[in-house]
Amino acid sequence: MEKNQLYHKAKNVEDAMAFAIAHSEDFRFIAGGTDLNVNRFHGTIQTSCLIDIHEIEELRQIKGEGNDLHIGALVTLDELMQNPIIKKEFPALVEAAHSVATPMLRKTATIGGNILCENRCIFFNQSEWWREAVGYCLKCEGEICIATGGTKACFSKFVSDTAPVLICLDAKIIIADNGKQEIVKLEDIYTGDGLKPNKLSNTALVLSIVVPLNKTYKCVFQKLRPRESVDFTSLTTAVSVDETGRVKVAVGGVDPKPIVTEGKSLEERDELIKYVMKKSRVVDNDYYTRPYRRLMIDVLLKRCFKKLSSEEN
Ligand SMILES: Cc1cc2nc3c(=O)[nH]c(=O)nc-3n(C[C@H](O)[C@H](O)[C@H](O)COP(=O)(O)OP(=O)(O)OC[C@H]3O[C@@H](n4cnc5c(N)ncnc54)[C@H](O)[C@@H]3O)c2cc1C
């Protein structure tokens, strides 16, 4: 490593923010490190400064406040899966968390890191010599997207498995940045640009994820991947219906951002699926082929709707 490396263990949110502002040009927050460290090892993310947030106690809580459940950004996926309120109210979130990586990784991986994990592509998530051999892709020092055979846009895929379920549960996130706090809808932070998948400023610290507790959602989750463990998603689907009958669909793995749409009832299934198929910019950047993944959007979403309809009756 040529650059001087700085590693700061933040004591609290204020300390993390102050350090972030002082090093805003070249740093990353590190939570569990299960995504960031792999990218650093491969050289696809290079920052000289790391701000370790994982011991900030106030970001490790799960608590009810009014009609909402606040899930601290540093709650690990394993803790989330064990939490009695989440198990009872949001079983699809438990299922989504359970589908991430492996048991050991889930004990370290956090929910905040999961919703912000880096987009992936088979031409990007490779070793330095591999990337050099193919001439580097747009996301990594190259000039064109190799997956699409030469476009100037990056179609690396959005791979967080918990985000589609959280979006279907109308989750918001609380962000601290520059001395201020704001709350935004989770789906609004994603850009659709594989080069910069989310619009948070680089000093923005996610404090918690807020999920309404009073909407009696039914939500289901389906994931496609080569093996039932370890593998990142090739397609993640989530569908929810709330007490008014409103349906929300969120799909990951087939575009640089989650594809989200809503309908008034489960009867709108075919139009909602059609919308997702139309919006998904699936390219050949996965182990499964593009036509197969497109076909599976229809299959997995129909399975989700079938499951929700049978639960409704
Ligand atoms: C073998 C393997 C398999 C995997 N499989 C899956 C999978 O199936 N599905 C899946 O979704 N993921 C998978 N992952 C990716 C990763 O493990 C998870 O996404 C994990 O939840 C990331 O959390 P983390 O705490 O380790 O994030 P980190 O690696 O610490 O951080 C990830 C990113 O988020 C930023 N960040 C983290 N916390 C905050 C915060 N509070 N505020 C602002 N920025 C923050 C970091 O700066 C970094 O850019 C896998 C990883 C490995 C190594």
Image (cartoon, grey):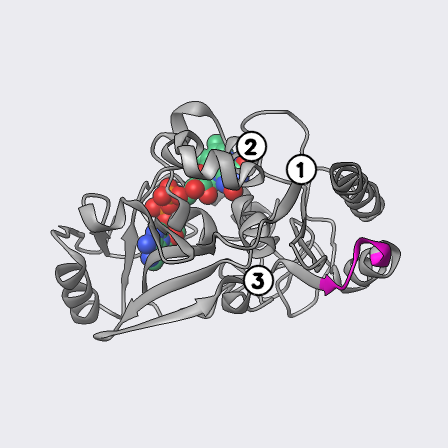
Where on the image, by quarter, is ligand 1? top left
Was residue 162 drawn as part of the magenta stretch in this picture?
no
Report which residue position mark 3 lands on. 194
Report which residue position mark 1 lands on. 223
Q: Position of residue 205 (x, y in %)?
A: 30, 62
Q: Position of residue 229 (x, y in %)?
A: 57, 25
Q: Is mark 2 within 8 Å of ligand 1?
A: yes
Classify residue 139 as left or right of residue 266: left
Measuring 16% from the left and 70% from the top, which residue is drawn there?
22
Q: How many marks?
A: 3
Q: Quadrant of residue 14?
A: bottom left
Q: Is the residue 226 above or below the residue 76 in the image?
A: above
Q: Which residues are magenta?
A: 262-268
Q: Are marks 2 and 1 in contact (CB under 8 Å)?
A: yes
Measuring 81% from the left and 39% from the top, which residue is drawn there?
306
Report which residue position mark 2 lands on. 99
First-in-chain label (3 vs 1) = 3
First-in-chain label (2 vs 3) = 2
